[in-house]
Amino acid sequence: MKILLVDDEIELVSAMAERLSLRGIDADWTDTGEKALAMAEECEYALAVLDMKMPKISGLELRRLLSGKYPTMKFIFLSGHGSEADYKAGSAEATSYLIKPIRIEDLVEKIQEATQ
Amino acid sequence: MSIYSKVKPQFWEAGSRSGPNKNLFNFRRIWHLAILLLAVVALVPLLIMTFIDYNVTRHSLESENLLRTSRTTSNTRRTVTNFLHERKKALAFLAEHQGVQRLLNKQNLEAILSSMQKSFGGFVDIGVIDENGKQRAYIGPHDLLGRDYSEQEWFQNTLSRGAYTSGVFLGFRDEPHLIVARRIQDFKSGKSFVLRATLDTEEFNTILSSIDLPDTGDAFIVDRDGIIQTPSKWHGDFLSKVDLPRPEFSETTRVLQETSKDGTAYTVGYAYVTDTPFIVLVIKNTAELMRPLNTIRMELLWLLAISIAIILFVIVGVATYMVNKIYMADQTRARTLHQVEHTNRMASIGRLAAGVAHEINNPLAIINEKAGLINDLFVFKEEYANDRRLLANIHSIIASVERCGKITKRLLSFARHIDVHEANIRFKDIAEEVIGFLQKEAEYRSITIKMNIPEDLPEFTSDRGKLQQIFLNLVNNAFQAMNDGGNLAISASEEMDNSLIFAVEDDGCGIPETDKKRIFDPFFSTKKTTGGTGLGLSITYGLVQELGGAMTVDSDVGKGTTFTITMPLKANKADDNEDITG
């Protein structure tokens, strides 16, 4: 089982992917929605962890594009903002919604919940 | 509490605010103006009507008095005229039918006098005087036969005019009397004689005394020189000058208002008696005539005073009620306006906080992940696992990031809840969030915060943002009221009537009894000199009402204050039109 991490902050998303790998979760990462869509074409991901606010393609838009193509794919949203709109959309359209900075244990727990 | 403070309307102490929060109205001025205008509108017509009514009554009474005086005077003149007329006619009859020679006969003249005294009355004596003025025949009580009247004015007047009626005079007999005389012609000798009769003035006195007059009234006769001809009670001695001016000649009866030398006002009715020197005077004291007016005036004044008192009482009541209503409406307007301002300000602060938190969150998340990765490497890679000092430093970085994360999450949560409306609330979360904001200040000031919130306290539906504002305001107020080292307690309990009770209790300075009634009024502040706006508790009160709750305060000066909020388990929003009372 592979998961996909998408966040425009490369330093964040790369470190997060490495930490998940150390915990036995095979995670690919990228920093844009376009790249994520391309990677999804190449590889089958059970779950995508998406930052909600990204340039060009937002996390919500990316989620709609991915779920359109891969209906079984699960999603976890990350947000650094926590606005009411984000909260509502994130809670409604994803399995989980986490506000940065996150504890890696929380993310692992949410990933396991979503993929079980 | 004094009676004054009990009856004092709520708007009385409403200070005149300035600046953007100023009152729209000066309520005391409106109250004064309303009372003045209502009083003018109500009392001026009343006073005018009373004045007109009084004057109409006075004129009516004056007219009636004048009429009555005039009628009395006319009747008296008629009686006097008739009295004299009858006797003059009797004398004329004698002169025409008896002839001089028969009248000079003593027995005949005696019989005539006796007959006239019986038939007419009032005749004292009778005599015949020749043209030289010598009395040739006389029947009467005095010894006047042969008396010479040639120098007497009445004798000369009789000879020249043919008939004469004298005024009252003393004459030879030294007794008051008047005479009626008539010239007669002796056809034999061709000489003129005068037939003269003396009339008793007592007859006049009887006529005048029979007039129904008040005690101060007077009726008498004066001659045309103003000499009193019959006794007067108040206006001079008999045969002396009357103390009032002689009225000018008039053929008809007239009534005048005269003032005597001593300043007394009199109503004087007078009538000239035709073909005589007499003027009938009927004099009444004007003040006594107008005495009924005094009674009417007193009744009117009482009625006016009572009416004015009732009108003023109603006016003051109505004006106070209306101005109080305007004041309450203005209070509600001000509260609502500033609640909106406050909410907008909180929303702006929320947006600012969210922006700052978001900006900080991203680098914080990178630090978190990088530090986390380093920590993972130390944990998962055996070659680094033994360097305890490095591991401790990494843990410290991660702990600091977690602390920062909590702060930014709290800020984000606060901002998010400003816009949220109804949601399921766990009161403990609200209390912890609010305390979270002030935790550091509490630590610096050594303020002990105790929370007594049961774990099984039911969740309830309400507006999370508003509840946060309510408790943040109350806890902030408590912090301001307490000295360093104070104690704050937040408690909650469930009541039997499906409501929850929350209390915020401090051991601060307390609220004086006089301020308790007004602490929920907008702009009421005891901290204005230190920047208080007087809006905190007013807005809090408004928010509690909006959520369908109620707030009370219990405070002792020097001991502390407890704000208690009762909130329904299911929020019932207050009616927008409900009258909010502070």
Image (cartoon, helix red, strand yellow):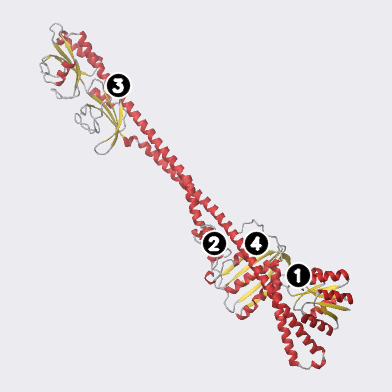
The correct choice, above or below, for B109 with respect to B201 in the image is above
Left or right position of B265 against B35: left
In space, the residues marked 3 and 1 are separated at their CA atoms by 120 Å
Instruction: Report the front residue among B345 and B441.
Output: B345
- Badges 4 and 3, same chain: yes
Query: Going from the N terminus, do you reach mark 3 or mark 2 first?
Result: 2
Q: State the residue position of label 1.
A: A86
- Crowding around mark 3 (Cα neighbors within 10 Å: few <14, some 14 to 19, many 20+) is some
Let me know if marks 4 and 1 both belong to one chain: no
SS at mark 2 in the image: loop
Camera-side mark, 1 or 2: 1
* Label 4 or label 3, whichever comes before in sequence order: 3
Locate residue B177: give its quadrant: top left
Indicate the secondary structure of the residue bearing disc 3.
helix
Residue, disc 4: B545
Marks 4 and 3 sit apart, C-alpha to C-alpha, by 94 Å
Residue A25 % position (x, y): 85, 81
Q: Are marks 1 and 2 in contact (CB under 8 Å)?
A: no
Taking the view exactly as shown, the residue that stands out farthest to the top is: B188
Amino acid type shown at disc 1: Asp
**Looking at the rendered structure, which numbered label has been put on residue B78?**
3
Q: Which of B48/B505 is in front?
A: B48
Name the residue at 78% across, 85% down. Answer: B373
Q: Amino acid at mark 2?
A: Lys
Camera-side residue of A56 and A105:
A56
Q: Gap between marks 1 and 2, in whole Å?
A: 41 Å
Residue under numbered circle 2: B22
Pointers 3 and 2 in contact (C-beta within 8 Å): no
Q: Quadrant of the C terminus of chain B?
A: bottom right
Q: Is residue B507 visible?
A: no
